[in-house]
Each structure stands twice: as structure tokens, then as C-alpha cells.
Amino acid sequence: MRQTRATCCYCGVGCGVIIESDGQQVLGVKGDPAHPANFGRLCTKGSTLHLSASPVLQQQARALYPEMRTDRNAARTRTTWDASLDAMAQKFADTIARHGPDSVGFYISGQLLTEDYYVFNKLAKGLVGTNNVDTNSRLCMSSAVAGYKQTLGADAPPACYEDIDLADVVFIVGSNTAYAHPILYRRLEAARQANPLMKVIVADPRKTDTAREADLFLPILPGTDVALFNGMLHICLWEDLVDAAYIEAHTEGFAELKQTVRDYTPAYAAQVCGISEQDLVAAARLFGKAKASLSLYCQGLNQSASGTAKNAALINLHLATAQIGKPGAGPFSLTGQPNAMGGREVGGMANLLSAHRDLANPAHRAEIAQLWGIDDVPAKPGKTAVEMFEAVRAGEIKILWIACTNPAQSMPDQKLIREALRKAELVIVQDAYKTTASVDYADILLPATTWSEKEGTVTNSERRITRLQAALDKPGETLHDWEIVIRFARKLEARMGRERTLFPYETTEEIWNEHRESTRGRDLDITGLSFQILEQQGPQQWPYPQGAAGGKKRLYEDGVFPTASGRAKFVNTVYQPVAEPVDARYPFRLTTGRLRDQWHGMSRTGTVAQLFAHQSEPTVVMAAQDMERRFIKAGDLVHVTSRRGSQILTAVAGDDMRPGQAFIGMHWGEEYVSGRGHDGDGSYGVNALTLPAIDPYSKQPELKHAAAKILKAELP
Ligand code: SF4
């Protein structure tokens, strides 16, 4: 039996796994005891990875050869790689010639490896000449990116997993860590056992399993996080818990923020958040007095029309109390997807360039143009996720290439998304699975390899890069994602009359080496790293510049920040209500989130029977009082309706919900029946209900809140 080292392909904890295989199929999986993310542990999802890779399931669900249709009303039929890529290249060349490069869009994924991401980004910005390349990480991490950049000067989580062991106070906000990042949560449980004085504060609209174990639970109303953080800072100021010397030496902009937070009295902030004043004061005191306070946060802050302000307000609190740049302290954003970090590193988003460069900066564009050997990188910002689908629907973007993601389930306002997919002149879907709803809209389906078949690198939440090895050969006619991009790019280059290819790579190492060179002198400098070091010494954290003995665990320990002045910046954050407040017609605050044993749209976890033991079908969770008032019993079917659509779901009473709130898991979409396809009954999952309001800076949509009504379904 062969043993191969890789990482789990689900969440951003990035646990190391050892794949046991015979080279043809995966026989088992176990945690890698040498991997510093998990030291051999795996959660329910990771420990069943081998079941999702069983040959029978793979045969039913996998896309194994290219398919194409030339008539929208016809079914796709099997074709060859050359035929599909030639057709694509011709359509790209014609469309760019007629409508310009911005008539093309790429919507990619935090599931891709860093090398895949790098070549997609280069294809769009370097060859096609458009910045219309965005990713499902926009739905996940872009507010964290914007928050870090506005305050600390760079998109770099300053803390590491070891800080969980060293913290005195852990402040978990907008994160059901026990479900979404289970191995980190187990590390927290172990740290609490080792240090009984450690305190855990959880702020969340729902009393999640994470919240149930907290020393102090703050059941804030959805969207009120800025009021919470400003209120805590107000109390820290009033009780002299801020660090004036740190503020003076290492930051700027505090005077203005201080004026703003004067208004966030405990009474006002507690009233906005819907919590008691005593609890708010207790949280501020615990946080401000601790030797080391660590915040763990995720989609509850990010998936919001004021997500950047929420991130910045929390970081303000850390800066004011000097809870950053020391063991056990810091604002630590937990990455949702396995390689959202890698995508950010290579600049695979509409507003970014390689190695944390900004598209808006002419010097940064010139640096990348020089590295790539092109005249220039286009200056016009690309369309971000929601904007991209709006532009497709408006007819501005005519070709949409979707890779390794399923927008026909995961994007907000499915009506908008599906109108866009129908409107596009050409939809290309590159995926390992043919079971996603997005594949239904594909004119060309490009079959890609997936977990256990791919090799390259990923970066986890603590900036740690892991080298993955492939355990299996490529099945069927699949290709690696980077290979598909390169084969296509060379065909397009031929049509564009380009003599020297921009894509001369034969291996992932060659791609990664070019990415490495792009980081020279940047905050994420990895010029001291190599594939050889990653293979021989194991996963490493960035930065890891040339000559360094190792990566850096923790950032900003010297109090110097990567801003023009070297100082961190306080952002003057003001509380904004949710984008769609509740009213008499839509009185429920509907929120969405992950379940413990499922991942995203269930392409993989949905094939493992035992992962349905925790929850077998989609439900809407409501407070018992709300159900009684509406004569709804547990198990009844109800209509959940927003201004955009409606779903029929089974009602469940949950003591985690406050009256007036409702929760739906994000994982279910249209049902796929083998041999028949999707049922097409309009049951698009919770994103039939969510709204496409976006944050003005991060452009992340407000997936965490929509106004809804819930009525008992009547039998016909
Ligand atoms: Fe996979 Fe995340 Fe579970 Fe680790 S914690 S095994 S990365 S799902």
C-alpha cells in the first residue's frame, strides 16, 4: 500500500492527511501526525475523505471527459480536449476582437491549488487583458482582506494556531468554530483544560455549540458587531484598559476613533446589540485586562454589507489594547476554504495583483507586467463576484468560465444568477463533478482532477504552505486545472499571433517558482522557500525570505506595520444596520451557516452516507415561541419567503434561536438524481432567499442576513 502526504480538501484549518492507496483507488485516510495544523487529528469530514473517493461514487458523480454543445437547446455530447479548447479559443478571440477583453469573465475558487490560481490570474490579466477574474473567496474572506489592509497595511493574519494554546481570553465572534473549524476548536478545548483560568467569550446571534461552551455568551442581534466592538472599546477607554504607550508608538488615527466611540455608551451599544449592559461590560473587561486576548472570527463578520467595518472595528479593539504581536494575542481571521489564502497570495481576485499588490497602484502593475513580460496590466478594476454575474445578465460579459465552484447554488439571489447563466453567450464549467447545478448551464464541460489526484501547494489560515502529493493517477480524460488553463492559453496565444508563450510551464514547481519570485521584497516574501524544503522539512509559514532559517509564526512583534508610515491605522468605524431590515411583512431575521458534517454544496460530502447522520435534510430552525404563535409543529412543512424567492422546508424548534430569528444551513440546493439530473423544481436552497447587497470596500455579499416570512404550508 502506498502512503501519500496531502491536506484535507475541506476547511481552511488545512489539516495534514496521509492517503493510503494502491495507486488506483484511495483505500483509507488518516491524520498526518507530523503536520503542525492538526498533529494527526481529523474531524468527521476529514476522516471520511476516502469514502467520498470510492470508485462507485466517483463513477456516478465525476466528470471524466470533455463535453460540448453547439446548440443551447441541445444536450452536451462527449468531445475531445482539442475540439473543446479550440472552440473556446476561437470564441474568446472573436469575442475579444468584437467587444474587447472585458467581455470575458473568470469565476474561480478557493478550492483550487495555488498553482491553478496563479495561471488563471495570469491568463485573465496577462493574456486576455481583463481584470474580470474573481473567486468564491469573495463570498468568504474578502472583508477580512479589506479589514487587514485598511488597519494593518497588508492582508496577513498576524497570529498562528499556537496562539490558541497561549491565550488568556479567546473572543470568538461570527464563527461556529466547533462546526466550521473543528480541529482548531478541539485545540481550544485542550488549551482550556490545560489552563482553567482561560476565558472564552462568544458573540453570535445563535447559541451554537461553540456558544454553549463559552464562559460568556453574547447573543447579539444579526449585523450589530460594530456596535459591540465600539461599545467594548468605549468601556476599555473609560476604565483605562487601553494601552496609551502602544497607541502613541505604533498607530495613527486614534483621536478620531475616540471621538466616535464616545457615543457607544454601554447602554446604547447593549441596546443596539440586544444584550445586557452587564454582559457587554464583562466582555470588555475580560478582553482588556487579559495578558493575551485572541480573537477568532469568520463569516459572521465577513458575509455582510458592512463586513469591512466589522473586521476593522475588531482590529481597532486589538490595537487600542495592544492585543497584537505577542504570544496568545491578535485578530485571527479563520479562512473558510482550503486555499483561499493561496488565492489571495497570487492576487486571484478582481482588485488584486500577485503577492498582495494592488491593481490600483501603477507601480504594482508595472512590476507584474515586467515579471510576466507583457506591456502592461489593465488598470480598470475587474468585476467582483456579484458584479460579474450582474454584468453577465446585462450582456456586458459574454463568456463566463467557472472553475471548481458552483455559483448556481452558492451565490446570493439565485434568480439573478440563473438569469445570468442563461444570458451568457458561452458558459464553460471546469469541475471534477458533473453533479453541480452550474453544470446544467455549461455549454462546455471541462473535467478536472480533484483531491488525491492533484499535486501542488496550498496555504492554510495561519499562513502555512503545504506541499501536496498526488496519490492517484488522473481518472478518465481529466486534466489538472493548471494544465487545462495552459493548454487553452497556448491555443489562444496562437490565435492572437503571440510568438512567445506566457505559459512555458511543464510542472507545478515551475509555476510556483514564478509565484515565489513575485513575492520578493513583499510582506509575504517566500524567496527562501523551495519545493525541496517543503518536501524535506514539511509545511512552512510565510514570510520566509531568502536567508531566513524558517517562516514567521507571528507578525508585528516589533510594532512595525507594512503601511507608508510603519504605523497601524485605526479606522473610524460606525455601526450600520443590516442591508434589509425586518418589517411587518418580512418579520424574521434569517441567517445562514454551515452544519457540522457537510461542506459547501455537498458535491463530495453528499456522497458519504454517514455524514448525514448529524442532519439528513434541510430544515429551518425557529424559536419555539414563534412556532407556537404560527401554529407550526416540529416537522411541519413551512414556506420561507423573502423578497427574492421562496423555499419549502421542514420546521424545527431550536433553543439556539431568539424569537424573530430563523436559521437555514447553506449546503442544500437542487436535488440531483443520478441519470436524471437536477429536479429543476426551483428549490435552489437558501440562496433563493438571500440578497445581493455587497460591502462597499470588500464587495462581499450579505449572505448572513435577509428579512423573511415563514408560513405553515397548507396541504392542497
Ligand atoms: Fe478537514 Fe477542516 Fe476537519 Fe481539518 S478541521 S479535517 S481541514 S474539515
Image: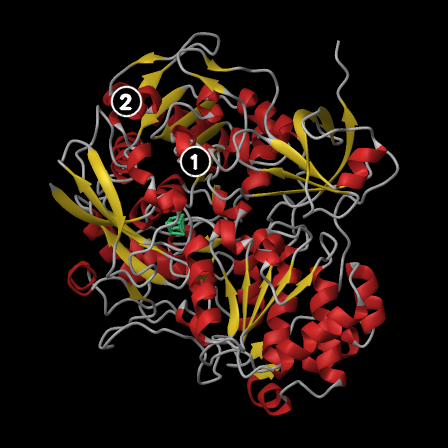
Disc 2 marks which residue?
A: 56
Q: Of the residues shown, which amino acid type is indicated by label 1?
A: Leu
Residue 197 against residue 481 in the figure, above or below: below
Q: Residue at x 79, y 43 (%)?
A: 660
Residue 570 drawn at (x, y percent)? 64, 75
Residue 175 drawn at (x, y percent)? 57, 55
Q: Residue at x 39, y 60 (%)?
A: 366
Q: Of the residues shown, which amino acid type is indicated by label 2?
A: Val
Residue 710 image-quadrant placement: top right
Secondary structure category for the residue under label 2 = helix
Residue 410 against residue 98 in the figure, above or below: below
Disc 1 marks which residue?
A: 611
Question: Comparing marks 1 and 2, which lies closer to the viewer?
Answer: 1
> Quadrant of the image for the C terminus?
top right
**Does the image show residue 431?**
yes
Which residue appears farthest toward the bottom when viewing the image?
A: 245
Q: Residue at x 51, y 33 (%)?
A: 407
Give the left or right position of residue 413, taking residue 626 as reference: left
